[in-house]
Image: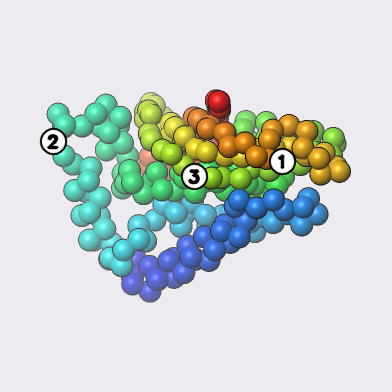
Amino acid sequence: MMTHLDIIFLLVLVVVIFQRLKSILGTRPEQEHRVKLSKESAEKLYDILMKETQKAQNAENLKETESEELTPVDEELSGVDKVLAEIPNFNKSQFLSAAQNAFQIITEAFNNGDTETLEMLVDKNIFKKFQDVIEQRRNDNISAETDFICFDSIDILNAEINDDKIAKITVKYVSEQVNVLRNADGNVIEGDENYIQNIEDIWTFERAINSTSPNWILISTKKTHD
């Protein structure tokens, strides 16, 4: 059971990480000054984001809050929500909040070539694809930049639990971004730094529902934009 001191400690860690993200996201670091999360911070990232630390409650009160959210009359639940209700201690609003932060952190790590952070947050197949792109950009002396303007919406599109008790949740992100690629001289070779794109990303996360770890791992991505 979490004590008030445990909650305060976790809140302090959240504030520290968010302050670091605030200083990283939406910036355009030079390649030699790129900033990345430390290994220790990355390891704690999902654990902190997925824990119920937004209110100073003890574990019993928190459990009651989650139970109230996940136990409406069955006929009022959508098919997706019925699946989500089968995931122990799942809180939809907390998951979406964490998914939003994970999106920004993973995107920033990818652009910065931060493979240590990526390896902890994505599965092996996605990591290999990211790693190949990162290596190709390094070989071509190309740097990537993403400036987040805002998220227009974040929604859960689908949820399923397979026979191996692995839960998969598909999230749709609609965001406004500025994306460019630059060559070694700093010149834009793809994208427009003055053009805001409306982008739709579909990401799928998975976790064993009986796992003691709260970590959701990214297993697939796809993107469309105007």
- In this rendering, position of residue 135 left or right of residue 128: right
Dot 3 or dot 2: first in sequence order is 2
**Inter-mark Cα distance, 1 to 2:** 48 Å
Is 166 in front, or is 43? 43
Mark 1, residue position: 144
Is 89 in front, or is 107? 107
Q: Are marks 1 and 2 in contact (CB under 8 Å)?
A: no
Q: Quadrant of residue 95?
A: top left
Q: How many marks?
A: 3
Give the residue at x 53% y 66%: 16
- What type is the residue that disc 3 sits on? Cys
- What type is the residue that disc 2 sits on? Val
Q: Position of residue 62 (x, y in %)?
A: 26, 58
Split into 4 quadrants, where in the image is the C terminus? top right
Q: Position of residue 224 (x, y in %)?
A: 55, 25
Dot 1 or dot 3: first in sequence order is 1
**Inter-mark Cα distance, 3 to 2:** 35 Å
| Label 1 packing within 10 angstroms: few (<14), some (14-19), many (20+) | many
- What type is the residue that disc 1 sits on? Ala
Dot 1 or dot 2: first in sequence order is 2
Mark 3 vs mark 2, foreground winner is: 3
Q: Residue furthest bottom?
A: 5
- In this rendering, position of residue 184 left or right of residue 215: right
Q: Position of residue 210 (x, y in %)?
A: 38, 42
**Inter-mark Cα distance, 1 to 3:** 19 Å
Mark 3, residue position: 150
- Residue 17's disc number: none
- In this rendering, position of residue 135 left or right of residue 54: right
Split into 4 quadrants, where in the image is the N terminus? bottom left
Mark 2, residue position: 73
Give the residue at x 72% y 53%: 29
The answer to whether residue 186 shows anywhere in this view is: yes
